Image: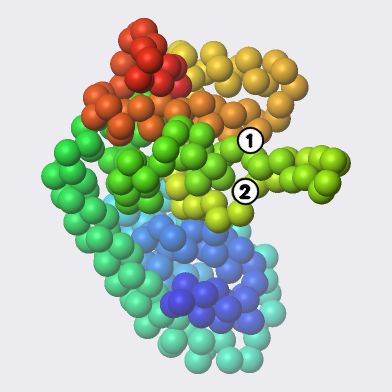
Amino acid sequence: MAGYRAAGLLVTIYSALEKAIGPRWHHPAAPELLIAYGGPDGLRAATADGLLATTRPLAPPMAGRLVEAVKTALNAQTVVVPGTTAVATVLPHLARSLRSVHDQRDQIAAQVEEILDAHPLAGALISMPGIAIRTSARILLEIGDIAAFATPGHLAAYAGLAPATRRSGTSIKGEHPPKGRNKALKRAMFLAAFASLSDPLSRAYYDRKRAEGKKHNAALICLARRRSDVIYAILRDKQPYQPTRKPTTRAARRIP
């Protein structure tokens, strides 16, 4: 909420600056600039070295680009909008609220990681390429008890990775995302599929789908659907990822 309010205020007095900072509200370096320098006047008075000193500890790779974007935005607007001084007084307070939200988010993330470490299947799931601690936590949270899904297909449908074919009488309406799908689970599996592209098996499958004419996102969805079966088998069998394991009558084929 604080981020939206700060963005709204910046738009009214300095739209170019909002375009520079707005896309980076989620990063602690952006609100830190407003906390340290206030509004446009304070940022304009600051040197590039001073802005870098504020942002670099929080965003080493991004600091230079952020400072350059801010300086470019400040030079782009020459008209002083009425109320700029008043807004500059409010912005640091909103930025502090946003920093507090970031701190709380980090604390929650740390707590989630601690809970995940205690989960009996955490290690098995993290053994799969592309699945890190936070993604694993989201997947485990959204799936819950794997026994609730009778087959891998049921899990894929729940995640929205298995399109449903709509019929009307004898006609087929085409494939559409199934109703009741879990968007958070789909996003986690999609991001995990993207992260797994450094794995040779996942990359080979993705490249095959691209060669078939599928676009990037569509190919990733196919990969996520394939990996969903593997996740199902890992959680059902309580065994880590084994790419070379031969399929059995009980375990799903484990190729991501």
Q: Secondary structure at mark 2?
A: loop
* Residue 189 horizontal side relative to residue 174, left or right: left
Tag count in the figure?
Answer: 2
Quick one: SS at disc 1?
helix
Residue farthest toward the right in the current orientation of the protein: 171
Q: Which quadrant of the view contains residue 192?
A: top left
Using the image as rendered, state which of residue 176 and residue 124 is in the foreground. 176
Residue 144 shows in the view: yes
Is residue 181 toward the left or the right of residue 232 in the image?
right
Res 195 seen here: no
Q: Circle 1 is placed at which residue position?
A: 217
Quickly name the residue at label 2: 178
The residue positioned 23% from the left and 37% from the top of the image is 122
Q: How is the image coloured?
A: rainbow
Q: Quadrant of residue 171?
A: top right
Q: Nearer the viewer, residue 98 or 132?
A: 132
Q: What amino acid type is highlighted by mark number 2?
A: Pro
Q: Is residue 70 above or below residue 224?
A: below
Give coordinates of residue 19: x percent, y percent: 61, 63
Instruction: Kindly identify the residue that appears in the image at 75 percent across and 22 percent down.
Output: 213
